[in-house]
Amino acid sequence: MSFGGYVLDHLPGLLLDAYQHASAVAQSVAVAAVIGVLIGIAVYRGALRSAITAAAASAILTIPSFALIGVLIPVFGLGVTPTVITLVLYALLPIIRNTIVGLDSVDPAAVGAAEGIGMSRIQVLTMVELRLAWPSILAGLRVATQLLMGIAAIAAYAKGPGLGLHIFSGLAQIGSANAINNVAAGTLGIVILALLLDGVYLLIARLTVPRGIRDTDR
């Protein structure tokens, strides 16, 4: 069977798995965003704290995803839970790092002006610093999302949702008629999802980042 014919025959299942794949990544990035931004806010004012936190988050990326999922399976079982925990942990580094970088890059004069008109510390953080750091934070979310798109395929090892099921199924049946089509369908689906989500981030940046800041970043 040709690849196109295989995709048409299995389109409903592929679309469902693509939705679950994107949903798992989006939810994991959302959770990691809350955790990562809060950690970044907590440590960015101290150089040593920032360095230690970034190093700890970097250490997570040195753990092979297979190994991390394998460690989590005995504790949380198969399915969505070990998948989401793994994805959240891998997403933390770019989000924490970019939050710290973004907050560090805020012009002290802007902070001083805000304090000068009577803003509280919380107001300065939420209305000035985080807004000015938003382009950097958004870039971290974008990197984390692209990183997780590939790692989420490994979730099939833990019976998690997503297009990785097609890749693992195809690899397990190498030599059969549609093994390569199965692998190719899962892989191509992940690539297409990654491109679509990247386009969403570009749209969010255009809608939420002031033109003056975008022009400065260029």
Image (tube, grey):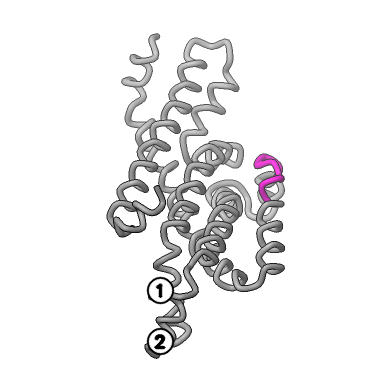
Image quadrant occupied by the N terminus: top left
- Counting residues from the start of the chain, the first of labels 2 and 1 encountered is 2
* Number of residues whose C-alpha sits closer than 10 Å to that of mark 1, classed few (under 14), some (14–19) or many (20 or more): some
Look at the picture and state if 196 lies above or below 91: above
The reply to whether callout 2 and callout 1 are in contact (CB within 8 Å) is: yes
Look at the picture and state if 57 lies above or below 178: below
Circle 1 — which element?
A: helix
Residue at which label 1 appears: 128
Q: Residue at x 58, y 68 (%)?
A: 39
Q: From where the camera sits, is residue 208 visible?
A: no
At label 1, the amino acid type is Val
Give the magenta-colored segment's residue range. Answer: 60-67
Q: Residue at x 56, y 28 (%)?
A: 168
Give whichever of 133, 188 is nearer the camera: 133
Q: Residue at x 60, y 42 (%)?
A: 158
Q: Position of residue 50 (x, y in %)?
A: 65, 65
At label 2, the amino acid type is Met
Give the number of the disc on residue 119.
2
